[in-house]
Amino acid sequence: MRYSWDVDTPDRTDPPAAMPPAAMPPANTPPVTMPPATTRWETLTAGRSGRSYADRFARLAATGVDLHGEATFCHALVAGGSRVLDAGCGTGRVAIRLAELGHRCVGVDVDPSMLDVARDRSTAVRWVLADLAALAMPAAFAPPDDAGAPAATDGPFDLIVAAGNVIALLAPGTEAAVLHELARRLAPGGRLVAGFGLDAAHLPLPATPFGLADYDGWCAAAGLTLERRFATWQGTPFETGDGPRGRGDRPVAAPGYAVSVHRA
Ligand SMILES: C[S@@+](CC[C@H](N)C(=O)[O-])C[C@H]1O[C@@H](n2cnc3c(N)ncnc32)[C@H](O)[C@@H]1O
């Protein structure tokens, strides 16, 4: 089973307002840190979809859909009271549930509209406005209450989860840097759990931005080893045509979604 929120194209909102022309800095001004690159998520949503994203989940919950598959999956991998980073936490669905289950959670997202909803929902999670590609940088683009952000995200974490297509929705070209940033925050033996679509039917994008081999390569370069892979958060085996045969000895269709567990 896959989750509809993994594949829905986010509600479109007005295009972002035009940026005012940049003023020339005075001479001898120190170099300014580059702002974060635009994520695919921001390109899709203009950074304004927090409330509509949360409302969509609320509607799903009202129909009886279990919204906690990712949290349940992660909870089963770690000991009680583990340190967990929800990378690309959005409106906090996964981190809040993991905190309810007794874990010490930090949620990081670069989209203020998503994080605003998360903050309204729970004070049991430490929420941090930051770019996953630059977690070590001072939170130069964060509001004052995030001044302690780098410390909160330092870890080490027993588990880092990137649910809901986060990796596929990073800024193009930043994937290797993000995997590096996440890997160095894992405790020895800690796990990175990421779920994302492998085709357009499972992504809010017209085409998949990269393949599993790319993802595994970035993880390997960051020092992570693939431990297990599933086709759903409910633990459906990840089987491709290269593996076990389907009924009538036909090749099994490659899954359109992967939940990957890498270990430090
Ligand atoms: C589809 S939402 C998933 C939210 C949440 N993980 C969930 O499953 O409900 C993808 C999220 O990834 C976040 N994201 C993408 N690139 C990011 C980056 N470089 N740093 C931090 N967050 C990022 C987006 O802002 C967005 O909130």
Image: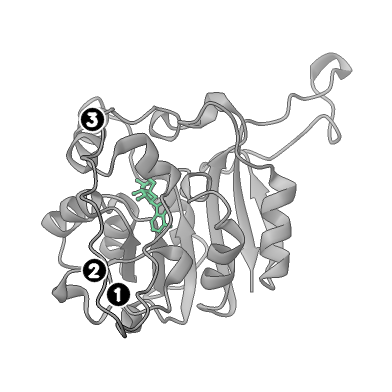
Q: What residue is drawn where x is 47% and y is 55%?
A: 162
Residue contact between numbered discs 2 and 1, judged by CB atoms under 8 Å: yes
> What residue is rendered at 72% in x and 65% in y?
220
Q: Which numbered dot is residue 142?
A: 2
Q: Residue at x 43, y 56 (%)?
A: 37
Identified by mark 2, the residue type is Ala
Q: Residue furthest left?
A: 120
* Mark 2 surroundings: few (<14), some (14-19) or many (≥20) residues within 10 A: some
Mark 3: secondary structure: loop
The three-letter amino acid code for the residue at tag 1 is Ala
- How far is disc 2 from disc 1 in space, using C-alphas? 5 Å
Residue under label 1, please give it: 139
Q: Earlier in the sequence, mark 3 or mark 2?
A: 3
State yes or no: discs 3 and 1 in contact (Cβ < 8 Å).
no
- Seen from the viewer's position, the closer of residues 220 and 26 is 26
Residue of label 3: 13
Query: Is residue 52 left or right of 246 when viewed as pictured?
Result: left
N-terminal of the pair, mark 3 or mark 1, is 3
Mark 1, secondary structure of its residue = loop
Give how far across and how far down residue 7 sits, in percent.
Answer: 45, 29
- Cβ of mark 2 under 8 Å from ligand 1: the answer is no
Amino acid beneath label 3: Thr
Q: Which quarter of the figure is the C terminus placed in?
A: bottom right
Query: Residue 263 appears in which quarter of the rendering?
Result: bottom right
- Residue 173 in the image, given as x and y percentages of width and height: 58, 53
130 to the left or right of 13: right
Q: Is residue 231 above or below residue 223?
A: above
